[in-house]
Image (tube, coloured by chain):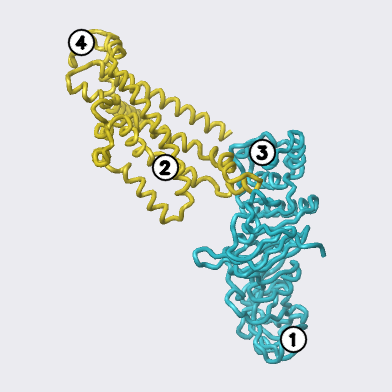
């Protein structure tokens, strides 16, 4: 693949003795859409602010295009930021907002005018230049914030939960818009969010973070299908995380029953965490399943039914397009390929958490 | 019943108006009274106003008042705005402590502030006069500026300041270009508040002024002690009119500003 655009080496940061980032290493390739994903307080925003130059790390270096920029102030970095609450200059018009960076760089009047027109077209707000910022909706303001950043032709665009303040429909529209923008501009995006769906939709690479540590780096598919630990499995989508014993390669015991799987290299009779996604649990006739249970709850969710099945003392979460009424006896079958084996958490940050959202 | 209610409402408002404005009206009427009597109306005259503008001492004190109010509120606005910026960056606890410290002079009885300042000037052998009054006014004006600037700063999104730097502005030019315009209404109202407070002050000026210097309020006080002087009524009327005009101007400015914002 192409070169590293930005390289974070051994970055640590604490506030008042509280560790926010602990010896983090991370690099971002040119033209990549990378998402930092995690719950609030995981260190994702701090990482972004260190790259942007708004925070200085306690230890470590930030290398940008081969140069150490750790102590460079934000105004001298060849990158731009889109802030969570837009941070538009409310006493200026849309045009003046977009022109802000270009005027500081003393670009010619004509150049600035062309750039403004180009940027407004790019974010689908052609003709809005003379408007006051306050007269725009939240979604429009966010587009202006993006336009204001990209006219400076940065190598790298940092986006700090830019869609967090928008409503669901608008958020989804803007996700596609951002992907389109990224492809048209050909610049690198670093995107911060706590929304796993947003991360899965847009990213080339997802970095899952918790409590100041990187939990997993990978493509959206890899993160979803092969979570490295209980935290990742739990944070990315819903899942059944069950205690298991790895009897031998390709065979795991869960809740007293033996399930064939495809994982190897965990040794023999070793305690592990087993992740099974709710859509991978197949409900069959009681005698046809690996284990048998009873449906205890049923909710219609539109695309599928969500059911809880009590089997061998564990309440399985099941998503299925086939409906089984409450009280019905069912068997549970899981395709070996859909069983994901993980090592037991070695530290608190790797444990599954309950997230209210 | 409804009609009676309406009448009661109107009556109440009228009563309030009378209570608030009857004293000032009396003053205005008396300033045009031909005789010195406070009890009898003996015809309309401008002579007290004419006498006022011939009185050198009064004109001097008017000049003092304006200069002191202007300079003290300008200096206080500068210091108060800088203090607000620093306080806004503080953590919560130190900020609250600082807030308390700056609020105390404002809540303190004027007479306590006045006497303490007087004692301080005496102790440090600082000759009372124009400068001591000016320093005293700057001192009591600063909290009013902080009180109106700090909330504006708190409202300002910190990211706005960072966004300007992100777009290439140095911290100083980022402050001048995006933060200052944002908090300017707060700075202006702080300045006007300080200006009014300074114009208004009697007690603190009284204790910190020397023998030779007078502002309007201390002048009125000494003149009235000497006997009835309808020129003083005229002067007070003019001051009332000036404040009224100032107030109307500020309100109109605010109203048009809000209109453009809401547009």
B88 lies above or below B30: below
Q: Quick check: marks 1 and 4 in contact, CB under 8 Å? A: no
> Which residue is denoted by mark 4 in the rendering?
B35
Q: Nearer the viewer, mark 1 or mark 2?
A: 2
**Residue ranking furthest to the front:** B125
Which chain letter goes with mark 3? A
Residue tagged by mark 1? Answer: A265
Q: Chain of mark 4?
A: B
Local crowd size for mark 2, using a 10 Å CA cut-off: few (<14), some (14–19), many (≥20): many
Disc 2, SS: helix
Relative to A127, residue A237 above or below: below
Compared across the picture, whether B66 is left or right of A196 comes to: left
Pick the residue in front: B19 or B1.
Answer: B19
Share a chain, discs 3 and 2? no
- Considering only order in the chain, which callout, 3 or 1, is on the residue closer to the N terminus? 3
Q: Which chain is cyan?
A: A
Which mark is in front, 3 or 2? 2
Q: Nearer the viewer, mark 4 or mark 2?
A: 2
Is residue B110 visible in the rendered image? The answer is: no
Can you identify the residue that label 2 sits on? B146
| Rendering quarter of residue B223 | top left
Chain B is shown in which shade? yellow
Q: Chain of mark 2?
A: B
The secondary structure type at the circle numbered 4 is: loop
Q: Are marks 1 and 3 in contact (CB under 8 Å)?
A: no
Viewer-side residue, A166 vs B234: B234
Residue A94 marker: 3
Please name whichever residue, A240 or B253, is drawn nearer the observer in this view of the structure.
B253
């Amino acid at each position: 693949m192409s070169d590293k655009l930005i390289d974070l080496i051994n970055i640590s940061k604490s506030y008042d003795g509280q560790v926010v980032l602990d010896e983090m290493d991370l690099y971002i390739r040119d033209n990549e859409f990378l998402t930092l994903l995690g719950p609030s307080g995981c260190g994702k925003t701090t990482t972004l602010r260190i790259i942007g130059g708004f925070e200085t790390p306690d230890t470590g270096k930030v290398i940008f295009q081969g140069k150490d920029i750790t102590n460079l102030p934000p105004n001298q970095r060849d990158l731009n930021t889109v802030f969570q609450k837009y941070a538009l200059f409310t006493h200026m018009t849309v045009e003046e907002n977009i022109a802000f960076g270009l005027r500081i760089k003393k670009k010619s009047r004509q150049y600035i005018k062309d750039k403004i027109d180009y940027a407004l077209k790019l974010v689908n707000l052609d003709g809005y230049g003379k408007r006051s910022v306050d007269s725009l909706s939240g979604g429009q303001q966010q587009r202006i914030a993006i336009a204001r950043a990209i006219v400076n032709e940065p190598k790298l665009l940092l986006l700090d939960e830019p869609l967090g303040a928008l409503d669901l429909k608008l958020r989804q529209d803007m996700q596609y818009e951002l992907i389109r923008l990224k492809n048209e501009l050909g610049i690198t995006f670093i995107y911060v969010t706590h929304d796993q769906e947003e991360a899965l939709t847009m990213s080339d690479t997802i970095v899952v973070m918790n409590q100041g540590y990187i939990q997993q780096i990978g493509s959206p598919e890899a993160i979803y299908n092969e979570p490295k630990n209980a935290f990742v499995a739990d944070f990315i989508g819903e899942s059944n995380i069950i205690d298991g014993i790895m009897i031998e390669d390709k065979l795991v015991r869960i809740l007293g029953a033996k399930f064939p799987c495809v994982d190897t290299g965990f040794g023999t009779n070793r305690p592990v965490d087993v992740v099974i996604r709710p859509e991978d649990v197949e409900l069959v006739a009681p005698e046809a399943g690996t284990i048998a249970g009873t449906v205890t709850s049923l909710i219609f969710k539109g695309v599928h039914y969500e059911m809880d099945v009590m089997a061998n003392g564990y309440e399985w979460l099941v998503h299925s397009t086939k409906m089984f009424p409450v009280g019905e006896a069912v068997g549970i079958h899981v395709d070996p390929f859909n069983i994901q084996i993980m090592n037991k958490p070695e530290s608190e940050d790797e444990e599954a958490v309950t997230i209210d959202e | 019943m409804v009609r009676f209610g309406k009448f009661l409402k109107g009556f109440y408002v009228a009563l309030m108006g009378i209570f608030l404005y009857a004293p000032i009206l009396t003053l205005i009427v008396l300033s045009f009274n031909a005789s010195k009597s406070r009890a009898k109306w003996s015809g309309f005259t401008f002579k007290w106003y004419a006498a006022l503008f011939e009185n050198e001492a009064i004109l001097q004190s008017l000049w003092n008042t304006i200069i002191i109010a202007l300079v003290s509120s300008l200096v206080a606005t500068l210091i108060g705005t800088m203090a607000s910026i620093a306080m806004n960056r503080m953590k919560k606890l130190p900020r609250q402590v600082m807030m308390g410290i700056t609020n105390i002079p404002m809540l303190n009885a004027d007479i306590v502030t006045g006497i303490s300042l007087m004692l301080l000037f005496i102790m440090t052998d600082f000759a009372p006069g124009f400068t001591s009054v000016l320093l005293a006014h700057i001192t009591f004006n600063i909290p009013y500026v902080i009180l109106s600037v700090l909330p504006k700063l708190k409202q300002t999104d910190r990211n706005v300041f960072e966004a300007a730097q992100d777009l290439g502005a140095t911290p100083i030019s980022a402050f001048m270009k995006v933060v200052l315009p944002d908090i300017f209404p707060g700075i202006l109202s702080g300045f006007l508040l300080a200006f009014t407070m300074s114009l208004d002050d009697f007690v603190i000026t009284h204790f910190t002024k020397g023998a030779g210097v007078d502002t309007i309020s201390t002048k009125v006080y000494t003149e009235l002690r000497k006997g009835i002087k309808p020129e003083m009524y005229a002067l007070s009327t003019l001051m009332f009119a000036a404040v009224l005009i100032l107030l109307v101007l500020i309100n109109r400015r605010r109203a048009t500003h809000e209109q453009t914002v809401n547009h």
